[in-house]
Image (spheres, rainbow, N blue to C red):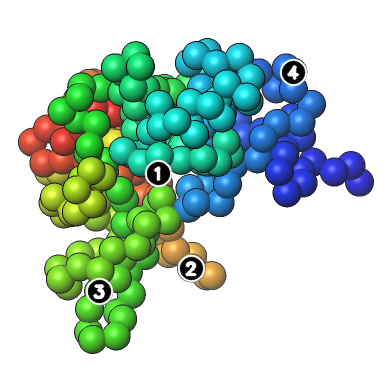
Amino acid sequence: MAHVSNKRHLRNIAIPKTWPISRKRYYWIIRPSTNGYKFEYGMPILLWLRDYLKIVKNKKEAKYLLRNGKVLVNNKKIKDLGYNVGLFDVISIKDLNKNYRVVMSNNLKLKLVEISEQEKDLKIIKIIRKNLVKGGKIQVTGIDGRNFIIDDKDIKTGDSILFNTKENKIEKVIKMNKGNLIYIFYGAKVSTIGKLENIKIFRKPFGHTRFVEYINIDSNKREETIFDYSIVIGEDKPLITVR
């Protein structure tokens, strides 16, 4: 069987369909680092700079920008060209005075949307795991792999955290409650924003699947998608730019 990946690279046939690059251009391509995101929800910083934004021509130029802090991800200097920049992460290009957020397009491709200087410090993180740790405290894990110790014992998987990446603090917990706004980041309804109506559970012999029912804010139609494909982004309005 042919190899489709190694420790540093992926074969072109193994490139996730969500990556907005041509599979025909490369035989081998840089492999994302394992920093929390699934491969489908992010793409290496090298590819964002070289193939998407086209502000560098090669790895050498990309390394120069990263090493000298001219490109930041979530307000942090990074060195790894394979650093996986994923859903709702912010790429800041200092020399261009530009800030971009990673979102999903309606054709299920990752893309960047330009955001303001005031918004670049904020990121919404979906909670995918909750544990009780020493001292009776609650530890939650986000979709991006971050762990947080919080006092809110009522927080649930599916809720979101509005996180300030500059001050490294939680600004707000956004509950997955009826009436709040959700963003669909995968599946057939990708890039849709809706007002949450209900969470349904479809039970099966070996587990269960959760679905969300929502009102599409663009069409005003009632729709549904898999719970894991949605993230709550605000109450009356989105707290960050998502499209």
Q: Find the distance from the CA under tag 3 to the CA under tag 1.
A: 24 Å
Image quadrant occupied by the C terminus: top left
Q: Find the distance from the CA under tag 4 to the CA under tag 3.
A: 46 Å
Q: Secondary structure at mark 1?
A: helix
Which residue is drawn at the image coordinates 29% and 85% (left, top)?
A: 134
Disc number at residue 229? 1
- Which numbered disc, 3 or 1, marks the residue that appears first in the sequence? 3
Q: Find the distance from the CA under tag 2 to the CA under tag 1.
A: 18 Å
Disc number at residue 138? 3
- Which numbered disc, 2 or 1, marks the residue that appears first in the sequence? 2
> What amino acid is at disc 1?
Tyr
- Which numbered disc, 2 or 3, marks the residue that appears first in the sequence? 3
- Left or right of 22, for residue 85: left
- Determine whether label 3 and label 1 are within 8 Å by CB: no
- Left or right of 74, for residue 240: left
Residue reaching furthest to the front: 68
